[in-house]
Every structure is written in C-alpha cells, then in structure tokens.
Image: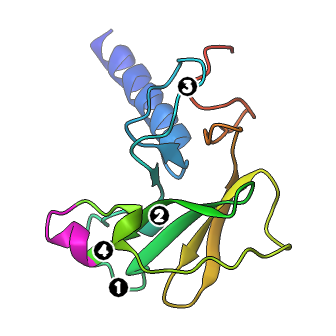
C-alpha cells in the first residue's frame, strides 16, 4: 500500500511540476483578485538562475514591454541580481522602439544587448499572462 501511494504521489508531483515549469508567471502578484496589478514582474528562462549556477548563454539584461502601451513594465539585470539587488524599470537604460510585428495584447521580453525579442506571451489588459488552458493566471474558473 505504501509503495502504491508513493508511486501515486511521485506521479502527481511530476505532473504538477511539468505543468508549472516553463510558464511565464507574474511574481508576487495578488492572484485571484479582480483587477489585480502585477507588482513583482514576470519570471521565465530569461531571468532564471540555472541549477548549475552558470548563466552562460543567458541574457545579462532584459526588459518586458507591454505591446498595448509600448512601455517597459518589468526589467531584469543579472549583475544586480547576482549582487542581491532587485532591478527596477528605472535601473535599466533602454529606449523602446515599438515594432508593428510584435504580437498584439502581449508582453515581449527584449534582450537589451541585442535589442531582439527573445520571448513573448499573451496577457490580459491588467498584464496577467494566460495559463496553458487559456485562462488568466490566478483565475478561479476551471
């Protein structure tokens, strides 16, 4: 019986883990509240710290731009992060040049060194990304 429960638990953890890994999520948001505002930024591969500790090949600095407004809504600087400091939008000197090719109603992640879009994802009007089922993250509907 313990073996069966152990296997079921391991499968459940693996399934949950594979659902969460790789999603763009609003960090520190007030999920589930109507009209919530993204207050902690977005998390993804571009601002992750690899288990190996090596950030080789990852962008040193990125900005997240809302394609509805053309404004920077989040920023990440790996040097500041490695020094234990938070990066705010004001810490990054990057001039956004909106591109008509950007996907509508989205956030684009731009590597500030190259100026290239390295990731994009759809967001609601308040900036919440959608989950794998097309529902805004934090929504309580199933």
What residue does disc 3 label? Answer: 138
What residue does disc 1 label? Answer: 56
The magenta stretch spans residue 80: yes
Q: CA distance from mark 3 to mark 1?
A: 33 Å
| Disc 1 and disc 2 in contact, CB within 8 angstroms | no
Q: Residue at x 27, y 64 (%)?
A: 51
Q: Earlier in the sequence, mark 4 or mark 2?
A: 2
Q: Nearer the observer, disc 4 or disc 1? A: 4
Q: CA distance from mark 1 to mark 2?
A: 12 Å
Q: Earlier in the sequence, mark 4 or mark 1?
A: 1
Q: Residue at x 23, y 72 (%)?
A: 80
What residue does disc 4 label? Answer: 78
Q: Residue at x 19, y 63 (%)?
A: 85
Q: CA distance from mark 4 to mark 1?
A: 11 Å
Q: Residue furthest right?
A: 100
Residue 132, image x and y in percent?
68, 39
Label 1: state its secondary structure: loop
Q: Residues within 10 Å of mark 1 (few under 14, many from 20)?
A: few
**Region of the chain picked out in magenta, as a range:** 79-85
Q: Earlier in the sequence, mark 3 or mark 2?
A: 2
Q: Residue furthest left?
A: 83
* Location of residue 28 with respect to 84 vertically, above or below: above
From this viewpoint, is residue 27 visible?
yes
From this viewpoint, is residue 53 visible?
no
Q: CA distance from mark 4 to mark 3?
A: 28 Å
| Disc 3 and disc 2 in contact, CB within 8 angstroms | no
Q: Nearer the observer, disc 4 or disc 2? A: 4
Q: CA distance from mark 4 to mark 2?
A: 12 Å
């Amino acid at each position: 019986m313990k073996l069966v429960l152990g296997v079921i638990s391991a499968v459940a953890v693996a399934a949950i883990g594979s659902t969460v890994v790789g999603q763009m999520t609003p960090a520190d948001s007030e999920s589930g509240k109507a009209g919530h505002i993204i207050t902690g930024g977005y998390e993804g591969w571009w601002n992750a710290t690899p288990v190996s500790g090596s950030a080789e090949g990852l962008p040193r600095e990125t900005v997240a731009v809302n394609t509805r407004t053309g404004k920077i809504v989040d920023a990440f600087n790996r040097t500041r992060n490695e020094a234990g400091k938070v990066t705010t939008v004001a810490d990054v000197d990057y001039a956004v040049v909106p591109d008509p090719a950007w996907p509508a109603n989205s956030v684009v992640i731009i590597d500030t060194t190259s100026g290239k879009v390295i990731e994009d994802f759809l967001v609601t009007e308040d900036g919440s990304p959608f989950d794998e089922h097309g529902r805004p993250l934090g929504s309580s509907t199933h």
